[in-house]
Image: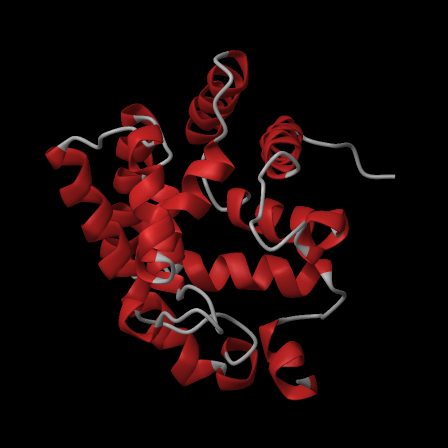
Amino acid sequence: MAEISEKETLVFDVSRMEWEMFQKVYNTGGRASCQDDPDTFFRMRMSQWLVYSEGLLRSYQADCQKAIADGKNLIFEKYARMMETTYLEEYVKLIPYLPVIAEREVLKIEEIVQIHLKWDKEMLEKYPHIRAQGRALHTEEDNVSEGSSMESYLRAELKTYSEKTCDMLYQETVEAWKKGDNLLQQIIANETAFYGYASLEDAELKM
């Protein structure tokens, strides 16, 4: 059996804390089915966190630990922010419970989002069948029946990170972009590997 690395331990720990917070998110329509599906949750979240550095993971681990200690819920904050483009009236009621984001961080978040949109378009061109399994791409496509797009989901999640974590993620995202790497493709490659596919090409063919 392969030995679990320190990074894999960090990835599991932050995903575990996210899962614990997710369990405490109240849905006005009743408990969501995805809240009873830890297998999918852990595959998705771990696939994402595996592409980032141990330093960033430790920073986010501290974010989660502090949030839990302070009685805050980062997953609630993420889903609350996502409601801005789907359930505006409910979102307005939740604004007093959401931290104010500094303008300098908002600018970095928007740059991260724009890079991910470009990466997502690359995924659509190279692996259309895989990409079809995911969320819509742009915020303008958000609606009540289909939910939030990738753009809105990512923007909302980034706003839950501390300034330190967001700055580190910004640096790693921009660096990857300049090098010609596609972190989103790496995340989805991790997902397909978790589901037993030999590669993205294998998954694309079978989908």
Report whether residue 154 is seen. no
204 vs 4: above or below? below
- Report how many numbered discs are placed on residues in the image: 0
Q: In this rendering, would 117 be left or right of 29?
A: left
Image quadrant in which you'd find residue 83: bottom left
Where residue 36 appears, x then y in whole percent? 75, 49
Q: Which residue lies furthest to the top in this view?
A: 69
Camera-side residue of 131 and 66: 66
Image quadrant in which you'd find residue 189: bottom right
Where residue 56 appears, x then y in whole percent? 42, 30
Report whether residue 17 is seen. yes
Camera-side residue of 174 and 117: 117
Camera-side residue of 71 and 157: 71
Q: Which residue is drawn at 19% across and 35% down?
A: 105
Q: Residue at x 33, y 41 (%)?
A: 93
Camera-side residue of 163 and 170: 163
75 vs 152: above or below? above
Q: Residue at x 75, y 52 (%)?
A: 37
Where residue 160 appears, x then y in whole percent? 37, 35
Where residue 18 appears, x then y in whole percent? 58, 35
